[in-house]
Amino acid sequence: MSIATTTPKSNQLPFILKILWVAMAVVGGWGLFQIFTNTSNPVGFSSSIPWGVWVAAYMYFCGLSAGAFFLAAWARFTKNAMLLPIVRPCVLLAFTSLIMGLLSIISDLGHIERAFSVFFRPQFHSVMAWLVWFYTAYFVVLAMLLVRKSSPTAAGSAEKCSCAAVSGGIFALVIAAGPGLLLSTLIAREYWHTALYPLFFMLGGITTAVGCVAAMAAWLWPGSDAMRNNLLGKLRTYLIALVCMELLFTLAEYLTPLWYGIGKDTALMQYVLFGPYWYVFWVFQVFLGILLPLALLIYKKTPMSTGLAGALVALMFFAVRVNLVVPGLVTPPLQGMDMAYTDPVGNSLSYLYVPTWFEWQVLIGIIAVGMAVWHLGCKFLPAIFPHFSKTDEVNI
């Protein structure tokens, strides 16, 4: 079966989403402007908590990007006729979410100009330096894939595409595991210092990407035909398996340290489960991100329910990243360190983190930028939304 190309409908996004984007661009645009022009912005960080929702957003968006690229490589490698139409949308999704992830971590830097030091004075024993170089190469690869026009299939191109798909899949897994590898090397933070984090990040990135693509196929795909329904059926199967794996990993991650109730991990796990932000875990991560999507996927096998389940998985996985970043910083690495010296604010070393409105405002602006990049990509780049046909064949 061959594939022909088409462009999305001109009125691809509903009117209400366009209005929402304008509001987000106005509100978030002012936050982004403040980030690049003002060095004294109101954030919830302290001398002991240097990371917050921006770092969590960076890990979330970069994981989504790597997962989308892996899904595109998997579709190309397996040559599954139902999955081939998502290759180009996945590459655009990977490019868009990578921009959002890089904007998130740039917002957290403070001195943005220092980010370029890693190119001129890199320390190659640093995982962070390797990540920056990999992200740079990854950005170039995605840009080249997007601007490449579709061309007729040539002899021998199948083998080349298979090799490229394998290479791209491995590259995507490295990118997905990168933030987890970075955290796992921080030996001073026991909550992060585990060799399993790279695997958690790979699984999380792929799960988020499949959920996002399922929502995209259900709500943004031009037309409604048998091809789209078959595609959603395949994505539904993937999503059920991946969400079940996430549930299994979550149970193992939390039950193991809580079984005997000893060790520093126990206090951190109890903070996540029963602390002041318990609802982030129980409501957003477990109920809206795992249980409700599973119920929709298993008992409601309609395109709209699949899209809703995918959107819930993709959006609520941000709670997983927040529960990863913040709990690792809210307890002193040494007992009594919070009272070791007097801080000008609060008279002691503060280990309380509450995101400010400005932090959310910047994040809203980053999402608005991503929505704009996605819309422009769908409008001007070739063959983002292909469909099946019996006439023309192209090389995706």
Image (tube, rainbow, N blue to C red):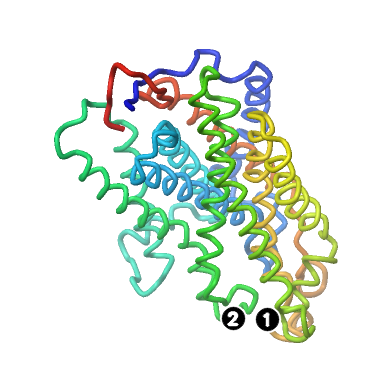
Residue 101, position in %: x, y?
52, 48
Residue lying at 14% horizontally and 35% vertically, measured from the top left = 155
Residue lying at 77% horizontally and 70% vertically, measured from the top left = 350
Q: Is residue 206 above or below residue 327?
A: above
Quarter of the figure with residue 72: top left
- Density class for disc 2 (Cα within 10 Å; few <14, some 14-19, many ≥20) is few
Residue 16, position in %: x, y?
68, 19
- Furthest residue in direction top, as rendered: 10
Task: Estimate the spatial distance between the alpha carbons at disc 2 and disc 1, rounded to whole Å.
Answer: 7 Å
Given the image, on which type of amino acid does mark 1 rest?
A: Pro
- The residue that label 2 is drawn on is 188
Number of marks present in the image shown: 2
- The residue that label 1 is drawn on is 333
Q: Is residue 184 above or below residue 322?
A: below
Residue 253, position in %: x, y?
67, 71
Element on which disc 1 rests: loop
Q: Earlier in the sequence, mark 2 or mark 1?
A: 2
Given the image, on which type of amino acid does mark 2 rest?
A: Ala
| CB within 8 Å, label 2 to label 1 | yes
Q: Is residue 278 left or right of residue 308?
A: right
Image quadrant occupied by the C terminus: top left
From the viewer's side, name the closer residue of 96 and 158: 158
Quarter of the figure with residue 308: top right
Residue 211, position in %: x, y?
59, 42
